Structures are given as structure tokens and as C-alpha cells.
Image (cartoon, helix red, strand yellow):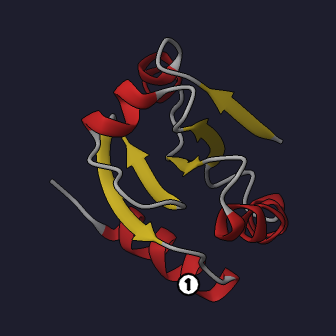
């Protein structure tokens, strides 16, 4: 299940979970975003224990998108402990998403 976020709920969603959160910054009119959605849903289904997946519509929540420097969509960012751990821009394959998750979970402060 994907969580829908907006400017108001973004920080709360990152703060309340103990798992990393992958946020898909997208827009409904974006072709690559539409292509990314089923790939991300299928990939996330098998990783429910490892992370949460959320979506943020950049047209409805421009403040958050701007805060994280999202200039192209789709942009996928994995947050852990409230910090950005990995980022990918453009449509990602399941293999690329696996590499992104591995990078995010291997990073230590």
C-alpha cells in the first residue's frame, strides 16, 4: 500500500516510522511517472517489511518538492531517520530500485 503525502503531512510521515520511507515525487500528467507507478508498486509489495512507500504530487505540494530540490520527475528519494539516504531521477527498474535501497540502508552517519 502506498501512502499519499502532501506539504502538510510530509514531515510527520517521515518522523513516525521506524522503517526507511521511499517517496515518489510525481505528477499525474508525467508519462515517466505513470510508467514508474506499476514498477514501484510491484517492487514495494515484496519489501513491506523493509520500507514504506509514499507518493507526493509535486503540483499539489510544491513547497516540499522545492525544499528537496526536485526539478525533474519522477524523483525517488529514500529517507531514513528523517535524512535523505538515496535519490534517483527518472524511471527506475526493479533492479535499480534494489540498488537504491541497498545504498540507502548501507549508509551510516
Q: Quadrant of residue 91?
A: bottom right
Residue 67: percent from left, percent from top: 26, 34
Please, is residue 93 above or below residue 65 in the view? below
Residue 16: percent from left, percent from top: 51, 20
Q: Please report the residue visible at 35 percent of the width from the left and 63 percent of the height from the top.
A: 86
Residue 23: percent from left, percent from top: 54, 46
Residue 65: percent from left, percent from top: 39, 38
Which residue in the protein does label 1 denote?
A: 96
Direction bottom: furthest residue: 95
How many numbered tags mark residues here? 1
Taking depth in this image into account, of 106 and 70 the one nearest to the observer is: 70
Please, is residue 36 above or below residue 41 in the view? below
Direction front: furthest residue: 29
Look at the image and tell me in which quarter the N terminus lies.
Answer: top right
Taking depth in this image into account, of 87 and 107 the one nearest to the observer is: 87
Q: Please report the residue visible at 52 percent of the width from the left and 38 percent of the height from the top.
A: 58
43 lies left or right of 63: right
Q: Quadrant of residue 96?
A: bottom right
5 lies left or right of 37: left
Q: Please report the residue visible at 51 percent of the width from the left and 73 percent of the height from the top.
A: 90
Callout 1: 10 Å neighbours few (<14), some, many (20+)? few
Taking depth in this image into account, of 108 and 99 the one nearest to the observer is: 99
SS for dot 1? helix
Q: Quadrant of residue 19?
A: top right
Amino acid at each position: 500500500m502506498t501512502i499519499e503525502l502532501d506539504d502538510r503531512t510530509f514531515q510527520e510521515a517521515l518522523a513516525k516510522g521506524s522503517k526507511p520511507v521511499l517517496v515518489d515525487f510525481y505528477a499525474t500528467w508525467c508519462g515517466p511517472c505513470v510508467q514508474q507507478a506499476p514498477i514501484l508498486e510491484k517492487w514495494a509489495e515484496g519489501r513491506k517489511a523493509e520500507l514504506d512507500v509514499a507518493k507526493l504530487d509535486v503540483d499539489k505540494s510544491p513547497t516540499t518538492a522545492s525544499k528537496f530540490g526536485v526539478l525533474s520527475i519522477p524523483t525517488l528519494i529514500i529517507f531514513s531517520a528523517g535524512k535523505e539516504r538515496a535519490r534517483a531521477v527518472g524511471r527506475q527498474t526493479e533492479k535499480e530500485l534494489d540498488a537504491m535501497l541497498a545504498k540507502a540502508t548501507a549508509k551510516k552517519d
